[in-house]
Image (cartoon, rainbow, N blue to C red):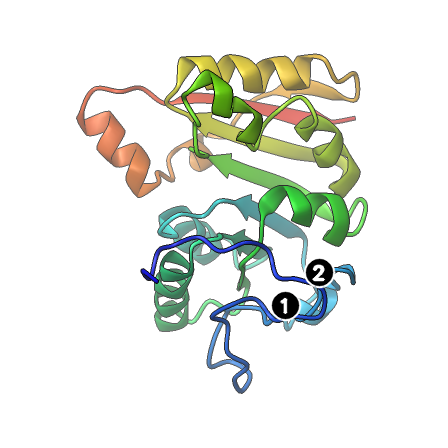
Amino acid sequence: MKADQALPAPANGESCPGVTRVAPRSTLIHPLTSILEPLNPSALFPESLPLELELGSGDGSFAIQYARRHPDRNFLAVERLLGRLRKIDRKGLRAGLINLRLLRIEASYLLEYLVPRESVQALHVYFPDPWPKRKHRKHRLVNARFGELAFQVLSPGGVVYLRTDGEDYFAQMTAAFAAHTQFFLAATPAELAGILTDFEKDFLAHGVPTLRAAYQRR
């Protein structure tokens, strides 16, 4: 199996494939042992701080920069590809980011079943898999149901930050939140917009603009 090959979410009682239990502080990867028990954010991090999630962290370029700039927040980066997760782990350990943790699981399942209600201050979703073929669009992360899942985990006043390079997907993203009465359109802070992912840098270098939106929970 290739290092970056995606694996399904673990079955009942299994550990996430490829995640080895090791001594504390030797890895930032959380050893998820059950997909039935909700996460306990206070047990993930050494300090109790506001929690933010990134769904689909890729190579971790945003997660590393953001966690470094915001030591006053706990940041949970979610990524299904093991090779990418290990890369983020190495970077985070070298940077000494005690406010960063990593989790390997399907993002939509995490939101629906494992994240405690109203426990998150911000969700970051940057350049999720576009699934461009019409017959595959049902697999997109930000779909008609995503707004309800975001509402479930965000605390009042919490924000969802979205980015993509695909006009069609962006239209679907904005439609999903426009249809949800408990969210309103918000601004993306300049400081946040200035933290670019490696994908974004590559797109911009080829003249492909970033489409952004932010929605705040009432």
In the picture, the disc for residue 35 is 2
Tell me if residue 114 comes above or below residue 139 in the rendering: below
The residue pinned by badge 1 equals 32
Left or right: 32, with 79 as reference point: right
Q: Residue at x 24, y 26 (%)?
A: 204
- List the single residue furthest toward the bottom: 23
Q: Residue at x 47, y 16 (%)?
A: 134
Dividing the picture into quarters, in which one does residue 200 lie? top left
Tell me if residue 193 comes above or below residue 176 in the rendering: below
Secondary structure beneath label 2: loop
Q: Residue at x 49, y 20 (%)?
A: 135
Residue type marked 2: Ile
Q: Residue at x 75, y 64 (%)?
A: 40
Foreground pick, 161 / 7: 7
Left or right: 42, with 67 as reference point: right
Tell me if residue 173 comes above or below residue 15 in the rendering: above
Foreground pick, 153 / 195: 153
Dividing the picture into quarters, in which one does residue 114 lie? bottom right
Foreground pick, 143 / 51: 143
Tell me if residue 172 comes above or below residue 13 in the rendering: above
Residue type marked 1: Leu
How many numbered discs, if any? 2
Label 1 close to label 2 by CB (< 8 Å):
yes
What is the x, y in percent for residue 76?
Answer: 57, 56
Secondary structure beneath label 1: loop
Question: Between marks 1 and 2, how big is the CA–CA gap?
Answer: 7 Å
What is the x, y in percent for residue 198?
Answer: 29, 42
Task: Decide if residue 67 is in sight here.
Answer: yes
Q: Mark 1 Cα within 10 Å, few/some/many (few <14, many 20+)? A: some
Task: Decide if residue 73 is in sight here.
Answer: no
